[in-house]
Amino acid sequence: MSEQQAVLFANSAFYTAFATRDAVAMEGVWSKASSITCTHPGWQPLVGRTDVLASWRSILANPAAPRITCRAEHAAVHGDCAIVTCIEQIDDGKGNVEFLTATNVFVRTGSLWTMVHHQAGPVNLDPRSLEDEEKPALN
């Protein structure tokens, strides 16, 4: 597996934990060795493992939280750091779909890529631009 594929695998683990509402898996995605940060849409930045993971536990425990699908992933590896940009498709379960643009930053510790930053925010996007994706979206 190439480094780019390994980073995309780590990114997929993040979105799988989100989709399955698995707080334990979500904790495992995030770095334990590095300082972590997260900016949810409309939130102030969260700094540190305690605050970041508390936010995710709250989001994952909310039965009204929307379904998120990761689309159009792109990974850029810079030594022991990697940046994944992607589009998050948000489905509220009532037929409303919106899109966010997301940046996920990973660091390599040994052979593992773990997340150190996530930020998502609104994007003006024509959904038809996602129709030519090479791989299916995660559910």
Image (spheres, rainbow, N blue to C red):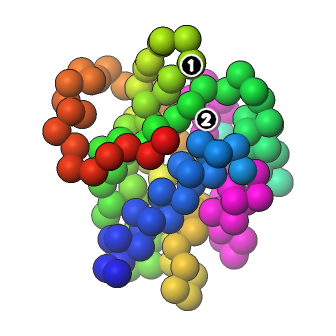
Which is nearer the N-term, disc 2 or disc 1?
2
Q: Are marks 2 and 1 in contact (CB under 8 Å)?
A: no
Residue 46's spot in the image, x, y percent? 70, 44
Q: Nearer the viewer, mark 2 or mark 1?
A: 1
Residue at left 51%, top 23%?
91
Of 99 and 118, nearer the camera is: 99
Residue 34 counted in the magenta span: yes
Q: Which mark is residue 45?
A: none
**Label 2 crowd (10 A; few <14 / some 14-19 / many >=20):** some
Which residue sits at x=69%, y=59%? 25
Residue 46 shows in the view? no
Q: Residue at x 65, y 68 (%)?
A: 31
Q: Residue 60 magenta-drawn?
A: no
What amino acid type should be assigned to the residue bearing mark 2?
A: His
Judge from the rendering whether residue 60 lies leftward or rightward of residue 128; answer left or right: right
- Residue at the disc numbered 2: 40
Under circle 1, the secondary element is loop
In front here: 20 or 41? 20
Q: What residue span does the magenta drawing correspond to? A: 23-44
How packed mark 1 is, by other alpha carbons closer than 10 Å (few <14, some 14-19, many 20 or more), is some
x, y percent for residue 126: 24, 21
- Three-letter code for the amino acid on which mark 1 is drawn: Asp
Image quarter of the N terminus = bottom left
Q: Disc number at residue 92?
A: 1
Answer whether residue 22 is visible to the viewer in this image.
Answer: yes
